[in-house]
Image (cartoon, rainbow, N blue to C red):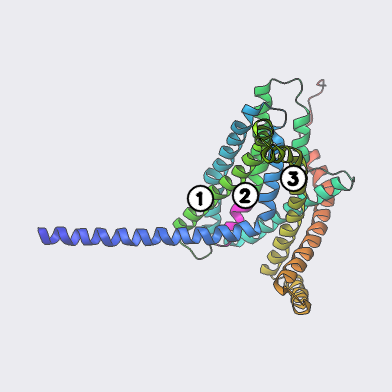
Amino acid sequence: MSTGLIALLDDVTAIAKLAAASLDDAAAQAAKAGSKAASKAAGIVIDDAAVTPRYVVGFAADRELPIIGKIAFGSLRNKLLVLLPGALLLGLYATWAITPLLMLGGAFLCLEGWHKVADLLGWGGSGTEADADDSIADTEAKAPEVVERERVRSAIRTDFILSAEIMAITLATLTGLAPWVQGVVLALVGLGMTAAVYGAVALIVKADDFGALLARTGNGAVRTLGRGIVLGMPLFLKVLSTVGMVAMLWVGGHIVIFGAYELGLKAPEQWVQGVTEMARAAAPVSPGFVAWVVRAAIDAVVGLAVGAVVAALVGSVLGPIFRRLKPSAPVGEG
């Protein structure tokens, strides 16, 4: 009896060690996948951090953090309850669809970047950010709680697209792993990305309040620092938005070029790599940095071109089709 119990305990210990090793491996994979996803999804994360503060404009200071908390909860729910199971099903039954879906997401980033450039140059255009601005402007006659619900829903809808791209990028780094490991890694990356983005958003939103507090209660240099924070936040948000615009074009262009390479269209990626290597060889100092800048610049230009093509396609082809498919109002309705 005692021998059997000892053998059973040995088996339990071995299983526990195996489980611990598997969890350690999942954690290591999550860290690796998270770093890769963060680098490839830089445009998404920066743009999300730049755009989300718009959703709390016009609310009392004590409602800002609760609103951000609701958006973060909705984002996490999207990632864990909708996107994670969908990603696992893709990994199990439709791995061939991952690259095309990534390219669609990259094209969406290019489209959003194109809209931002068009708005910056006064060419018009619209995207999720412009839609959010329209929703924010049309709130004067509504009760604050209604406006808050609408803002939160709008932010969560926009976040769903960005979160889908983050999860797809992460899934593409997890090929060959067991489904449960993929699930754990996707969940950890989803948690980490959500905490990082909305933690940064919370800091950005409350930074001016913190600066105002320092300006009121501080002395000397502290008061000057507080005033500097208050005066500098609008410029900081503009810079962040511009960086997000460039990063969306660069990341989106890179995803499209590399996705085409994976699908067999290798010439664009090979050409870009050739130009990058030439820049690296010609650089007198910091060749790695110069090569990265050249690669990012080419990706951004390609992203801008892709965004322009997609915008034209949406405006001239898909838009009219959707308008025709949309049910018309019954006769007699205004």
Q: Which mark is residue 127?
A: none
Image point (53%, 62%), residue name: 32
Task: Decide if residue 185 is on the left or right side of residue 68.
Answer: left
Q: Residue furthest left?
A: 1
Work out which quarter of the rendered image holds the C terminus and state it. top right
Q: Quadrant of residue 281?
A: bottom right
Q: Where residue 108 sits: x, y (%)?
A: 73, 51
Mark 2 / mark 3, whichever is N-terminal: 2
Counting residues from the N terminus, which is met first, the one under dot 2 or under dot 1? Answer: 2
Q: Residues within 10 Å of mark 2 (few under 14, many from 20)?
A: many
Q: Residue at x 12, y 62 (%)?
A: 3
**Mark 2 vs mark 3: in front:** 3
Identify the residue under disc 3: 236
In front here: 229 or 167?
A: 229
Residue at image point 49% right, 61% down = 29
Which quarter of the figure is the N terminus placed in?
bottom left
Which three-letter amino acid code belongs to the residue tagged 2?
A: Ala
Of helix, strand and loop, which one carries label 1? helix
Residue 164's mark?
A: 2
- How far apart are labels 3 and 1 at the CA level? 31 Å
Q: Are marks 2 and 1 in contact (CB under 8 Å)?
A: no
Q: Please identify the quarter of the rendering in which residue 253 is found.
A: bottom right
**What segment carries the magenta color?**
163-173
Mark 1 sits on what residue?
187
* In front: label 2 or label 1: 1
Name the element at disc 2. Answer: helix
**Three-letter amino acid code of the residue under disc 1:** Ala
Q: Mark 3 touching mark 1, by CB under 8 A?
A: no
